[in-house]
Image: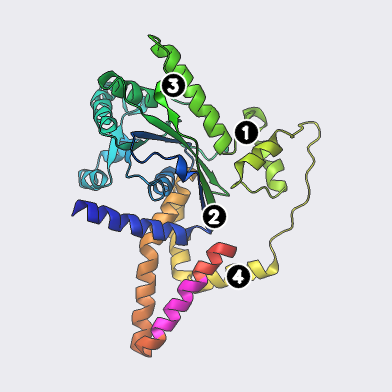
Amino acid sequence: MKKFGYNLVKIWIRTSLYLFFGKIKVSGLGNVPKDKPVLFLPNHQSALLDVLLIAVDCNRKPYFLTRSDIFKNKILIAVFDFFQMIPIYRIRDGRDSLKNNNVIFERCAQLLGQGEAILMFPEANHNLKRRVRPLSKGFTRVLFAALEKYPELDIQLVPVGLNYQNAEIFPDRVALYFGENISIQGLLLKNDIPGSTQKIKDTVAAALKGLTTHVEDDSEYENIISWLDAQGMDYLNPQEVNGTISNYDANNPQSKNVSRPSYARNILKGVFVLLNFPVVSAWRLLIKPKVWEPEFTGTLRFAFALFAYPIYYIIIFILLTATSNSGSALVVVTSVFFFNWIYTRIG
């Protein structure tokens, strides 16, 4: 029954994500082993959206290592357990809490030993900057805990590059690149855990830098991003973007002019706002001002839309049925739905 419920929710979330985003591009799924233990290692930009996008399209049923502070609500703990979320403790949660990770690492070792898949963010934090941040050694501790228990275990590391066109706006587009799987056994240095740890981190970091946009020079970050934006860069193609970055000259940044949004597109947006005025107003006035970090904008917008739109469509249907008939009401609701769907793809 739990498996049926999980699959039902997964279908609901997946369908909603594909309605929410103008485009979701998924590449490299053939790199995900189906019969071996896997540790998914994505870059981390847009909070829970990163998790959901990978979970619904990764061809596995992964467990998720998630920051422990969201597990404080006892009611939500059961929900998190249903979705196979496991708390991970960070130093910001208190130095004493770190000892709780020993139990977590032991559980992860058992899961990997059983051939399960785990998703963990090696950067250990989220940020909208288009660059791969230094990797934490936390994910390597999970690996070595598993190898201590199962020395010959052939754990496969699968780096995942998440690429948003603009994670703070709607509608947005996103591309996921599943990189070539990396066997942990090929990265181990005999009797040298520190050396092995560094080799694993370097290998994963290099893979991630090829799967997502990476601006290496942080001191020039804003200038480079402005330069890329001015060229209308398609961030869903990280290889092309990174190739363009390599040609950046701080002393002579040249870029072509990008055309502004057309009048037709502006009119389309106006119609969208008008047709969805109650939902758009509720988001702008009630929800968006409470977003505490820009990285959560996309996640909260999606969560809001996930529940708000079914209610909105139902209300429209009930009101129109009361004033006309159910047939006309169904036509109107269906028309609004399809207009919204089209708008997300061309807006």
Residue 6 - label: none
The residue that mark 1 highlights is 215
Q: Main secondary structure of the magenta part?
A: helix
For disc 3, the neighbor class at 10 Å (few under 14, some 14 to 19, many from 20) is few
Magenta region includes residue 107: no
- Where residue 44 appears, as percent x and y from the top left, is 47, 38
- Where residue 151 appears, as percent x and y from the top left, is 30, 19
Q: Do the CB atoms of the residues marked 1 and 3 lie less than 8 Å apart?
A: no
The residue that mark 2 highlights is 172
- Where residue 3 appears, as percent x and y from the top left, is 23, 52
- Viewer-nearest of labels 2 and 4? 2
Q: CA distance from mark 4 to mark 1?
A: 34 Å
Can you tell which quarter of the image residue 35 is in?
top left
**Label 3 residue SS:** helix
Q: Which residues are magenta?
A: 329-339
Residue 186 - label: 3
Q: Which comes sooner in the sequence, label 2 or label 4?
A: 2
